[in-house]
Image: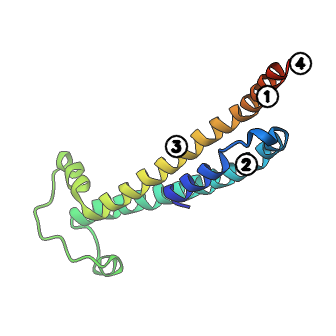
Amino acid sequence: MNIDQINDEWEQDSSIDRNKLTEESLKTPNLHAKYLKILMAHKVKLMSKIHAFNELKLAKFRYYRGEMSKEDLTEHGWLQWQGPRPLKGDMEQFLDGDKDMTKEKVRIQYLENCIYQLESILVQLKARDWQIRNALENQKFIAGQ
């Protein structure tokens, strides 16, 4: 699920029908389970992406140092590095500027944003029962009970 899909789902699920507060209260556990399931799936994806990123970082480190075999280069679809061998202090700059590394970082940041969004939704769901209870109390007050 991407951020737009999560937003669309939450837009539908977050509304509370003031005429059916009891039913809305009963929906909360199901909504919590739904968004928790989505959150956990994204966390698993994030861990997988971090692992892949770390493997790529090691491969790129070896690539820029000229330590990769022809088979390794062919496996990754890379040509032999023709530039100067970077010094230890310069290696981070090479890795930060690498297009493959940047793509993976963007994917990781995207998943982190999805996770932040889902965690925010779960926080809001915690407050949902309180909001419904407060609306019920307000209806009683208005009715003079």
Identify the residue under disc 3: 116
Furthest residue toward front: 143
How far from the left and from the top, in percent, is residue 30?
78, 49
Identify the residue under disc 1: 133
Q: Amino acid at mark 3?
A: Tyr
Q: Quadrant of the C terminus?
A: top right
Q: Amino acid at mark 4?
A: Gln
Spatial CA span between label 3 and label 1: 27 Å
Of the two numbered discs 4 and 1 on the same chain, state the one appearing first in sequence: 1
Circle 2 Cα neighbour tier, 10 Å, few/some/many (<14 / 14–19 / ≥20) = some
Of the two numbered discs 2 and 1 on the same chain, state the one appearing first in sequence: 2
Circle 4 Cα neighbour tier, 10 Å, few/some/many (<14 / 14–19 / ≥20) = few
Q: Amino acid at mark 1?
A: Arg
Q: Quadrant of the N terminus?
A: bottom right
In front: label 4 or label 3: 4
Q: Amino acid at mark 2?
A: Leu
Instruction: Please tell me which residue is depicted at 71% across the width and 30% down the height of the picture.
Output: 131
Q: Is residue 137 left or right of residue 52?
A: right
- In this rendering, the count of numbered labels is 4
Disc 4 secondary structure class: loop
Instruction: Please tell me which residue is depicted at 64% across the width and 55% down the height of the picture.
Output: 38
Disc 1 secondary structure class: helix
Circle 1 Cα neighbour tier, 10 Å, few/some/many (<14 / 14–19 / ≥20) = some
Of 55 and 32, nearer the camera is 32
Q: Is residue 118 left or right of residue 61?
A: right
Residue 145 has which mark? 4
Spatial CA span between label 3 and label 2: 17 Å
